[in-house]
Image: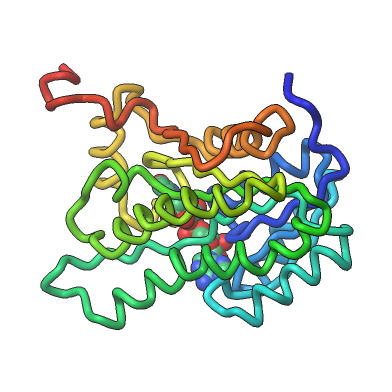
Amino acid sequence: MLTSIKGSSAVVTGASKGIGKGIARVFAKKGASVLGVARDAGAIEATMGELRAAGTEASALSADVSNWADMQRMAETAVQRYGGVDILCANAGIFPAAKLDDLTPEGWDEVLAVNLKGLFLTVKACLPAMKSKRKGRIVVVSSITGPITGYPGWVHYAASKAGQLGFIRTAAIELARYNITINAVMPGNIKTEGLDDLGGEYLDKMAASIPMKRLGSVEDIAYAALFFASEEAAYITGQTLVIDGGQVLPESLMALE
Ligand code: NAP
């Protein structure tokens, strides 16, 4: 049983659906006050409304993680509404597919702007609030794609997700003196609205390639994020945790027979 995060102020980006919604729901259920962030104002309001209807404390902010002014406004809002930023979950991300032949410079920039620069802006904006309390927990949602595996159509995405791990390792050293930890979860294939967009055939074939023969749930990721956000994880920083049902393990298709 982990120490409660009850009473903590948590910011979760990309919280209107998918993994971010799952993390926001679990953090709120565990007693944190959650500021949920996404660009679509109606969607993030509706999702945070669902959490409030379930009797938990959550509120919405429409903001774009690739926009510095938006991220500053996000941190200010968390301080005003909930007294600080104890936990930051940098989850917002995009994964539009395009093979090298079709990928444009603009397409590359868009993915890097949201997934990698967005991480930098999200973290930088929340640091003053964390440093003033001399404590903080930052949990980044990276991926197995890039740091460990490859998949045609996602060079830009893979580069952004591997880049996030480079970011956390140096940030961990800079932030250690303030008692702020930064770690990353690395999901495999998780059943979300974003993944559903890739189509039924993709989902079925992917499930067949996973030793546990199923895609992950958003809760599978949320409870790993909760561990990194807990008091018990105080001495863990700059580290990663793969949550993938064993997907990265098989040496070949024969290993799954
Ligand atoms: P999703 O279902 O598409 O949800 C993405 C969330 O991020 C939405 O709330 C979206 O809302 C928000 N978002 C996107 N761009 C944003 C921006 N510029 N500023 C603020 N919010 C933004 O995606 P998901 O599958 O849950 O993925 C969430 C994270 O997990 C991503 O970082 C992804 O790379 C990572 N991941 C997912 C999987 C998987 O299998 N699903 C596997 C590995 C890693 P708006 O569009 O309204 O902004």
Residue 141 lies left or right of residue 209; in this view the side is: right
Residue 113 drawn above or below residue 189: below
Q: How far from the left and from the top, in percent, is residue 113?
A: 43, 74
Residue 137 or residue 177, whichever sits in front:
177
Residue 217 or residue 181, whichever sits in front:
181
Residue 246 drawn above or below residue 66: above
- Name the outermost residue toward the front: 177
Q: Is residue 193 visible?
A: no
Residue 25 lies left or right of residue 238; in this view the side is: right
Q: Quadrant of the N terminus?
A: top right
Residue depicted at 29% across the width and 74% down the height? 108
- Coloured how? rainbow
Counting the numbered discs, the total is 0
Residue depicted at 37% across the width and 57% down the height? 163
Residue 44 lies left or right of residue 199; in this view the side is: right
Residue depicted at 17% across the width and 66% down the height? 99
Residue 127 or residue 103, whichever sits in front:
127
Q: How far from the left and from the top, in percent, is residue 255?
A: 16, 19
Residue depicted at 61% across the width and 73% down the height? 40
Q: How far from the left and from the top, in percent, is residue 212?
A: 35, 22
Q: How far from the left and from the top, in percent, is residue 235?
A: 63, 32
Q: Is residue 79 visible?
A: yes
Which quadrant of the figure has residue 205?
top left
Q: Quadrant of the C terminus?
A: top left
